[in-house]
Structure formats: structure tokens, C-alpha cells
Image (cartoon, rainbow, N blue to C red):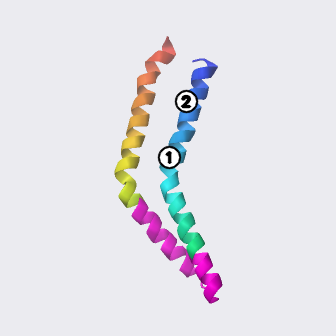
Amino acid sequence: MNIESALFWLQEMLTAVAVLCSPAMIGALVIGLSVAIFQAATSIQEMTLSYVPKMAVVVLILFLSLGFMLQFAVDFTTRIFEFIPEIAQ
């Protein structure tokens, strides 16, 4: 394996991590910001008010995007396994 192919697979791995993590992270960010604005506007400083909506939204997003995420991960793994014989050459 040369440096170009190693850098290519490193870039593909980082892209896969970003694609698989971003839906849940963006959902948690949006809900967290919304709850923080709501808490600042109403002077309610309850700590559980910020955790429960974030957990619910992350679970909902993971449930809805599980098919896409699983297919993306399977395709990425398949491409990696198809590349393994080329390393030995």
C-alpha cells in the first residue's frame, strides 16, 4: 500500500464518521440551543429540561435514519474488503 491509497482510505474513513455521526449531533445541537434559549427567556434553570429533549430527539433521529446509516456502513465495509486483495499486489 502506498501513501496515496493510505491517505485515500483515511479520508474515506473520516468522511464515513462525519456522515454517520452528523444527523444525531445536529439534532442534539438544534434541540440544545432551542432549550437554552427557552430557559434563558423564561428563567427556568432546571437541568433535566435540557437532557430529556436531547435524548428523545437523538433516539428519534437514530430510529429514523437507521436504514441509511446501516446501508452506508455496509457499503463502506464492502469497499474496504474489496480493497484488501489489492494491498498484497
* Residue 33 screen position, x and y as percent: 60, 71
Q: Which residue is mark 2?
A: 9
- Find residue 43 and report its image quarter: bottom right
**SS for dot 1:** helix
Query: What residue is rendered at 34% in x and 50% in y?
Result: 67
- Do we see residue 51 in this rendering? yes
**SS for dot 2:** helix
**What's the residue type where badge 2 is placed?**
Trp
State whether the magenta stretch is mostly helix, strand or loop. Answer: helix
* Residue 11 screen position, x and y as percent: 58, 34
Query: What residue is rendered at 36% in x and 43% in y?
Result: 71
- Cα separation between marks 2 and 1: 15 Å
Above or below residue 38? Residue 62 is above
Earlier in the chain: of badge 2 and badge 1, it is: 2
- The magenta-colored residue range is 35-61
Q: Which residue is mark 1?
A: 19
Instruction: Give the label on residue 81, or none.
Output: none
Q: Is residue 54 magenta?
A: yes
Q: Nearer the viewer, residue 10 or 43?
A: 43
Above or below residue 81? Residue 30 is below
Q: Residues within 10 Å of mark 2 (few under 14, many from 20)?
A: some
Query: What residue is rendered at 50% in x and 76% in y?
Result: 52
Above or below residue 75? Residue 70 is below
